[in-house]
Image: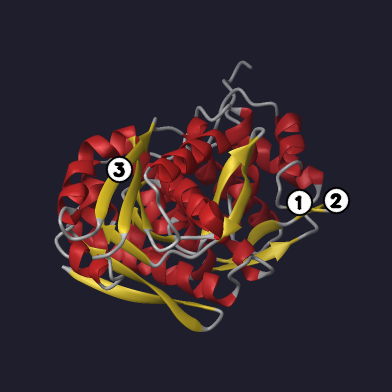
Amino acid sequence: MSGRMNILYEKKPCYDIVFSTSFEDLLEELKQLLITDRKIGIVTDSHVKSLYGDEVMGLLEGNCRKNVLFSFDAGEENKTLDTVKSIYTFLIKEKFDRKDLLIALGGGVVGDITGYVAATYLRGIDFVQIPTTLLAQADSSIGGKTGVDFDGYKNMVGAFYMPKLVFMNVGTLKTLEDRQFYSGFAEVMKHGLIKDSSFYEWLIENMYEICDRELETLLEMIQRSCMIKKLVVEKDPTEKGDRALLNFGHTIGHAIEKYKNFMLTHGECVALGCVAAAYISWKHEWLSMEEYYEIRDMFVPFYLPITIDDIDCEEILRLTKSDKKVEGESIKFILLKKVGKAVIDRNVTDEEILNALSEIHYMEENE
Ligand code: GLY
């Protein structure tokens, strides 16, 4: 089972996304990048290395000039310039030059870091994304955003840099731990909510198959989700306008992520942010009450939170304003004009944000 989609960059064909249920076709795809005379550096993390490191290294063996693997400790806390530096050191030691190739094998952290190294090492070398988590397949591996966290700010340092190929083996989603799988699902749900109500409905109709991780359903889900992201990033590759719609749920989501010291997953925070943004959309009378409650409750079967305890709403409001998506004083808030149609709204007030935070703030009866 497989499929393919080409991403245009500045209206020209730029890279293919290949959808598959195994790594069977990976070598043939890499051969299109003329790898025989190139060194290939796989960058991965300790967790993914133990799962797929040998398999991907084995595929490359004898098919390129040299294949080497660098792995760093898994975890968002390692998405730093220090990790970038250790990869530069490794590449220099292995004498990588500009015609060689990097492969990001892993989730969002691996993809973002490897992409940033590729963008900057020797002023840019080619790289391939092999995303192995739902978050990376549905979102972060597409569209050329690369970078690292800095000083407590997520993705504060980075570059737009396009891969040469994205190879998605949805079979890797089978080995993902439940919490990570559902975390990635928040981004899939987001795509339906902001751009495609029929996809949103399809997700609800197929919730059992998705939760059971049926490969055919996952393949269709990822392809439909990527098609939505493709259309958005092709129109606005460097986020001058509508690409910001992809940040639906992220303004409040990022603030909660930071407030909770990254103890919740990204997707859990995005789900809470989506509920809060849908609540504000209802209060703007853009969504009906029924639509708001349906959106909220549809995160539940996917084990995503719709309420959170122990938060200081004023502090989260403050963190919302320190998000890098704030331009000047006004927050670029993403709301839903209707299900399947998001808009940028710069006039959301502090009071509306605080009301939305109270809505998702779970308190014991006697608190
Ligand atoms: N994850 C949002 C974007 O790629 O723009």
108 displayed left or right of 245:
left
Which callout, 3 or 1, points at the residue further toward the start of the chain?
3
Report the residue marked by disc 1: 326
> Element at badge 3?
strand
Name the quadrant of the N terminus.
bottom left
Q: Can residue 290 be seen in this snapshot? A: no
Tell me if label 3 and label 1 are in contact, CB under 8 Å: no
Q: What type is the residue that disc 3 sits on? A: Leu
At label 1, counting other C-alpha atoms closer than 10 Å, the crowd grade (few under 14, some 14-19, many 20 or more) is some
Most extreme residue toward the bottom is 11
Residue 317: x percent and y percent? 74, 37
Q: Which residue is mark 3?
A: 69
Q: Is mark 2 within 8 Å of ligand 1?
A: no
Name the mark nearer the viewer: 3 or 1.
3
Query: Image point 49% across, 83% down: which residue?
Result: 12
Query: What is the quadrant of the C terminus in the image?
Result: top right
Task: Say how the picture is coloured.
Answer: secondary structure
Q: What label sits on residue 329 in the rendered view?
A: 2
Question: Residue 52 is drawn in which quadrant?
Answer: top left
Give the Cα separation between the discs numbered 2 and 1: 7 Å
Evaluate if marks 2 and 1 touch, with contact meaning CB atoms under 8 Å apart. yes
Front-most of residues 13 and 336: 13
